[in-house]
Image (spheres, rainbow, N blue to C red):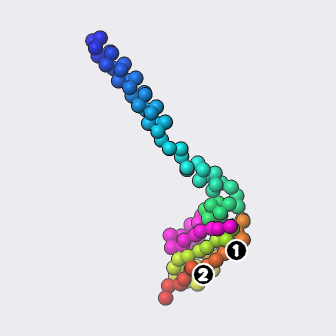
Amino acid sequence: MKFNLIAAALGIALMGNLAGVAFAADPPSTTSASRDEAARVGSDAWITSEVRSGLSGSTDIRPTRISVSTTDGVVTLAGMLDSKAQVEKSIAVAKSVQGVRRVDSSGLTVRE
């Protein structure tokens, strides 16, 4: 009985120490830094996120067909869409986002 209690106490103590070591060894999370960047209104990450969100909310555009990137407020759209109307709608969505300086849609093409 005494041996079981000692073994249990030792096991709990070791598990507590190992858990502390595991947490201490984990690298700092970059996710919070990414969230901070994306949270800044007008930042490139925020603009990209807002354009993607706007495209996702559109019923006639499949956002998975469009690549969105932003550099210094310039949104670049690339992908293949079904119609010229979808291209124009994608451009309009991007232009409607606060902080967008220009939209480069030269990478958008229409299926033939």
Q: Secondary structure at mark 1?
A: strand
Residue 107 in percent (x, y) is at 57, 79
Mark 1 residue type: Arg
Q: Residue at x 64, y 68 (%)?
A: 71
Q: Residue furthest bottom?
A: 112
Question: Which is more toward the observer, 112 or 59?
Answer: 112
Q: Amino acid at mark 2?
A: Ser
Q: Is residue 28 above or below residue 50?
A: above
Q: How many labels, in total?
A: 2
- Quote the CA–CA distance across marks 1 and 2: 12 Å
Q: What number is the disc on residue 102? A: 1
Q: Which mark is residue 106?
A: 2
- Residue 66 % position (x, y): 54, 73
Rendered image quadrant of residue 77: bottom right
Which of these two is toward me, 46 or 92?
A: 46
Q: Is residue 89 visible?
A: no
Magenta stretch?
51-72
Residue drawn where x is 49% and y is 88% of the image = 112
Q: Dividing the image into 4 quarters, which one contains the N terminus?
A: top left
Q: Is residue 48 above or below residue 105?
A: above
**Mark 2 surroundings: few (<14), some (14-19) or many (≥20) residues within 10 A:** few
Residue 14 placement (x, y as % from top left): 38, 26
**Location of residue 84 by image quarter:** bottom right
- Vertical relation: 18 (above or below) 81: above
The correct choice, above or below, for 25 with respect to 108 in the image is: above
Instruction: Tell me if residue 65 is in the magenta stretch.
Output: yes
Which residue is depicted at the point 45% across and 33% down?
A: 21
Residue, x 56% and y 66% (percent of image)? Answer: 56
